[in-house]
Image: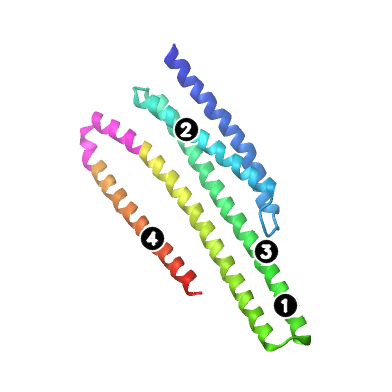
Amino acid sequence: MEVTASWDSLRQQARKLQAQLDEQMSLYRKLVSANISTKSDAAESDLESWIERLLKQLQQVNSQMKAWVSSGGSEMVSHTLTRHQEILQDLTQEFYRLQSSLRAKQEHASLLDDFREFDRTRLDLEEGAGSEQQTLLKEYASISRSTGQMDTVISQAQATLGSLVHQRSTFGGINSKLSNMSSRLPTVNNILSAIRRKKSRDTIILSLVISVCTFLILIYWLTK
């Protein structure tokens, strides 16, 4: 009875966290759709922090459920765990996608403001300022645009990294299930070995791509 109660308690916690995340994600979707501000405000930051905390708590509950299944849970329980993991993955990916979209919209609005300010200042300088001030203004506008573009790239890279980290955790759970299956069905060992080799190659390729992108961003930044 204690083991069953423990599993039921974990499922209740997971469902409660999923319901809270659904509610908060709905608010976040509306915020992203309506946002035209050039910078984050307190309400936006609080909402993002709350969603991140809920995702972390749900990940912890899923890890406890995974440990419970590994100790000898039934196939039905294993299927339930897989479903909870899929829900967590979907919520996490959607959150990072929305966050990246929001940062891009804010950066776009900021760049538009910079251009407007640049035009206003340029007109003022044309009326009574010297060429030296015009040169400085152009340099300032160029630096502002470059900085904005770099912030956008970094935000998107952070969102992508967060998604990859979560996918790595999900793949770990899948590997555990596949290992259990291989002990029952020895004939699938060759297939599992091929999957692991492909996963290792994909991991190496992803690491190389991220490293090259990071290096190119640093080079671009240093040359500006």
Q: Amino acid at mark 1?
A: Asp
Front position in the image: 40 or 127: 127
Query: Dot 1: what SS?
Result: helix
Q: Residue at x 45, y 66 (%)?
A: 218
Q: Position of residue 70 (x, y in %)?
A: 35, 27
* In the image, residue 218 above or below residue 183: below
For disc 3, the marked residue is 109
Real-space Cα separation, disc 4 to disc 3, in angstroms: 30 Å
Mark 3 touching mark 2, by CB under 8 A? no
The secondary structure type at the circle numbered 4 is helix
What label sits on residue 119 in the rendered view?
Answer: 1
Q: Quadrant of the N terminus?
A: top left
Q: Residues within 10 Å of mark 2 (few under 14, many from 20)?
A: few
Kindly identify which residue carries mark 4.
211
Q: Secondary structure at mark 2?
A: helix
Labels 1 & 3 near each other (Cβ < 8 A): no
Kind of residue sitting beneath label 2: Gln
Determine whether 142 is above or below 177 in the image: below
Which residue sits at x=51%, y=52%? 159
Q: Position of residue 34 (x, y in %)?
A: 70, 53
